[in-house]
Image (cartoon, coloured by chain):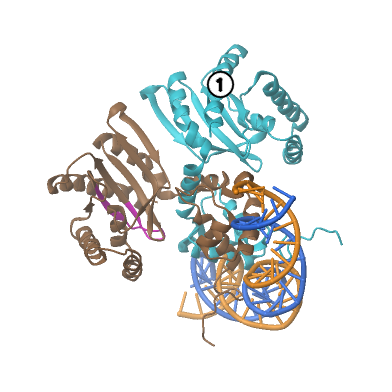
Chain colours: A cyan, B brown, C blue, D orange
Amino acid sequence: MAQARRYAGGVDGNRSLERGIEILRAFRPGVDTLGNGEIAERTGLPRSTVSRLTRTLVNSGMLDEVRAERAYRLAASVISIGHAMRTGSPVLNAIGPMMRAESAKRRLNVGLATADRTMMVYLESIRYSPRAALRNVVAGQQVPMELTSLGRAYLAGIAETERERLLKLFKRRSTAATKALLADVRRSIASVECDGYCAVSWQPAVLAVATPIVLDGLPVYALNMSLQNVDRSDALANEIGSYLNAFAAKCKEVLASR
Amino acid sequence: MAQARRYAGGVDGNRSLERGIEILRAFRPGVDTLGNGEIAERTGLPRSTVSRLTRTLVNSGMLDEVRAERAYRLAASVISIGHAMRTGSPVLNAIGPMMRAESAKRRLNVGLATADRTMMVYLESIRYSPRAALRNVVAGQQVPMELTSLGRAYLAGIAETERERLLKLFKRRSTAATKALLADVRRSIASVECDGYCAVSWQPAVLAVATPIVLDGLPVYALNMSLQNVDRSDALANEIGSYLNAFAAKCKEVLASR
DNA sequence: CCCTTAATTCCACTTAGTGGAAATGCGTAA
DNA sequence: TTACGCATTTCCACTAAGTGGAATTAAGGG
């Protein structure tokens, strides 16, 4: 009786919409085209249902049909919605320019991200490249939450219950080294609580430090700074960490005033 | 009997999904947060339906809830899907780097766009800025099809029937100057057919020229080059047009080989 | 504290969506 | 060319999932 029924007259949401979104989500960097069959496999939906939903997504302009391959590909609409998202993000609007300035000043990469399920997604990632003082700005890229400074700073910033929920998910998905990994994640979280930031090198020869940005009424964000082609040292991590703390403080100040 | 019924067992698509997408589309640059009421107004959907669909979109991670304002905002997921789109675009992958090089070489803006309904959306827009030789890359921005060189080049590239359908839509929406505008659009299309490109200045003091890129199995794209702070002259348009023709030819060559 | 305004939940109704099975279409090999 | 095999789409009977108007609840504002 009290059984929370999925899908009935409304309390839980709309099934078809949820499924359609799941189809869009099946496209990710690396899988540029998908046929109905493959979508059905990846999402676990019946083939006929997929067929109907992909048709709808084509009609709505979210997918392009690639007749030759009997497949679909994400349509340009999705980036225009993405653009609207970035445009409407008060955090990015407020501190985006500051991030660029900071990247130039400190000569390192500066990024802002938040969570999408168990991944962190960059709202903006400013890649500082010493040669030519050229900036490369990327948005939308995903990195794994549990392995990155960004993700761990995020975990440190969110509510306890949500954090534990996510940690359980990591345990479930990573086949190896789970114990050690989780301990490492918790160490990073402690580091954030103690020093304000955490430092992680999940890519070889890049040192990244990150700190959470918590504002009420908004999702938790994480701000990071990173440097390529360095060998990791605590001294360096401390230095960048202090830059990051100072910068984050400045950002929070700006963000506090609306 | 033969009446093509909207929404039944499948031929036309899925209503809830279509509506959900329409809700996402209601967010655009300038409208960063929307409440259920406002969404209902803009989409014409009943309030209770909107309430359920927005809940689903929140659960699916496409919207963030802004409790304080009883409103919603696009979530970070949408940019990660947008990123997947850009990553998976064979055209952007092939000619993106060429566009950057060309922008630096010619010292002007270079853009690639395709259509989203009646707007053109940039897959990439490389803004050349003389001071500091600094590039600013934007993706997802929309510009009106009928007013821009990009849009008119696109119109020149698509099938006749689709073109006429779109022209009718422009007629319907623009309240003033329709006659003159449509004539101007047709002139631009003729210009593409004759010279390979069309030139338009829809923003004051910026001259833009564009050309279509037609490849089978893919949507029609348009490539443009533009220059700020110039006064429009046919001589200048011709010069940029010839650069563009040359560049587009090079692009098509690259694209033809897979 | 009450009143206004907006969002959410209820609920009876039934249409819109479902998924297995059949049919169609497409590419390939013979 | 024809026949085969695979994948996608259409069909169709079934009914649960979704709908929207009305009632309810929640949230500021005076």
- Name the subunit of mark 1: A
Figure quadrant of residue B50: bottom right
- Relative image position of residue A40 (x, y in whole percent): 63, 60
For residue A205, say whether it is visible: no
The extreme top residue here reads A235
The answer to whether residue B140 is left or right of residue A148 is: left
Numbered disc total: 1
For residue A7, say whether it is visible: yes
The answer to whether residue B182 is left or right of residue A86 is: left
| Image: magenta residue range | B208-222
- Relative image position of residue A11 (x, y in whole percent): 73, 59
Magenta-colored stretch includes residue A20: no
The extreme right residue here reads A1
Q: Residue at x 53, y 65 (%)?
A: B44
Secondary structure, mark 1, is helix
Q: Residue at x 56, y 21 (%)?
A: A244
The extreme left residue here reads B235
- Relative image position of residue B135 (x, y in whole percent): 35, 33
Q: Which residue is mark 1?
A: A244
Name the image quarter holding the N terminus of chain A. bottom right
Q: Callout 1: few (<14), some (14-19), or many (20+) C-alpha neighbours within 10 Å?
A: many
| Amino acid on which the number 1 mark rests in the picture | Leu
Magenta-colored stretch includes residue B219: yes
Q: Is residue B114 above or below residue C10?
A: above
Q: Residue at x 49, y 39 (%)?
A: A139
Q: Is residue A147 above or below residue B244?
A: above
The extreme bottom residue here reads B1
Please state which of residues A5 and B134 is positioned toward the viewer in this rendering.
A5
Please state which of residues B57 and B135 is positioned toward the viewer in this rendering.
B57
- Relative image position of residue B81 (x, y in whole percent): 54, 48
